Amino acid sequence: MRMKRYNLSFLVVVFFLKVGYSLSQTTPTILIAYYSQSGNTKAMGEAVEKGALTVDGIQVRLKCIQEVTEEHLLLADAIILGSPVYNGNMSPKMMEFVNSWPFEGRPLKDKIGAVFVTGGGFSIGEEAVMFSLIRSMLIHGMVIVGGYDLEAAFGASAITGEGDFAGKSVDPLFLQKAEGLGRRVAELMLR
């Protein structure tokens, strides 16, 4: 009798491994990792989270990059990165974070990737930073997803310090694009 129980348990474990289920995690997980000094990029990350949570059956982890562990990266099915623009580049802290990702064996390969950014003004480098983040994800073999709308084709971005957008919190227009990005990533994870 003991041998039969052992064989049955073994077969159940093999079945779950063969069909691709993880015994420790079955709910698809999105990791939203951001760096924010002023709070604007954090606000965009919260909007991405809000959009993702409109889709049932998704777990979302919103974390500043200082809190993200290698385990968070490995367990996530999708990783959405957020960075402010620093002199036309991603923030140095974000670059350091991305450069610390595990690479040997490409453990992030085939995970969904997406990005959002904040910049102080028009034409200050939002798209350049988006592409820099996207290139980093592509090196790891990730599958990149853009935003929900044509105006957010590369991800979501916000202007936070020029014209009508100066001196106040992130404009609802940009938060809406961030929500759309989160919703799109979550919907694609369930397909």
Image (cartoon, rainbow, N blue to C red):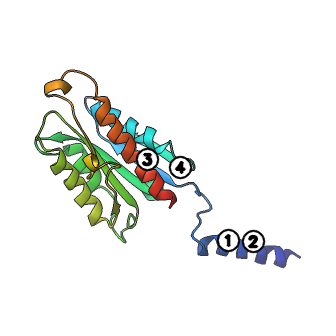
* CB within 8 Å, label 1 to label 2: yes
Q: Which residue is mark 2?
A: 9
The answer to which of marks 4 and 3 sits earlier in the sequence is 4
Q: In this view, which residue lies farthest toward the right? A: 1
Indicate the amino acid at tag 3: Arg
The answer to which of marks 4 and 2 sits earlier in the sequence is 2
Q: Which residue is mark 3?
A: 183
Indicate the amino acid at tag 2: Ser
The answer to which of marks 1 and 3 sits earlier in the sequence is 1
Give the Cα distance between marks 2 and 3.
Answer: 38 Å
Callout 4 environment at 10 Å: few (<14), some (14 to 19), or many (20+)?
some
Q: Which residue is mark 1?
A: 13
Residue 175 or residue 24, whichever sits in front? 175
Give the Cα distance between marks 1 and 2.
Answer: 6 Å
Q: Residue at x 17, y 25 (%)?
A: 164
Query: Where does the image place residue 139, in percent across and percent down from the top left?
Result: 26, 65
- Which numbered dot is residue 58? 4
Q: Residue 64, can we see it?
A: no
Name which quarter of the figure residue 104 lies in: bottom left
* CB within 8 Å, label 1 to label 3: no
* CB within 8 Å, label 4 to label 2: no
- Which numbered dot is residue 190? none
Judged by depth in the image, the label closer to the viewer, 2 or 3, is 3
Query: Where does the image place residue 185, in percent across and percent down from the top left?
Result: 41, 52
Give the Cα distance between marks 1 and 3.
Answer: 33 Å
Q: Residue at x 60, y 73 (%)?
A: 19
Secondary-structure class at tag 3: helix
Secondary-structure class at tag 4: loop
Callout 1 environment at 10 Å: few (<14), some (14 to 19), or many (20+)?
some
Give the Cα distance between marks 4 and 2.
Answer: 29 Å
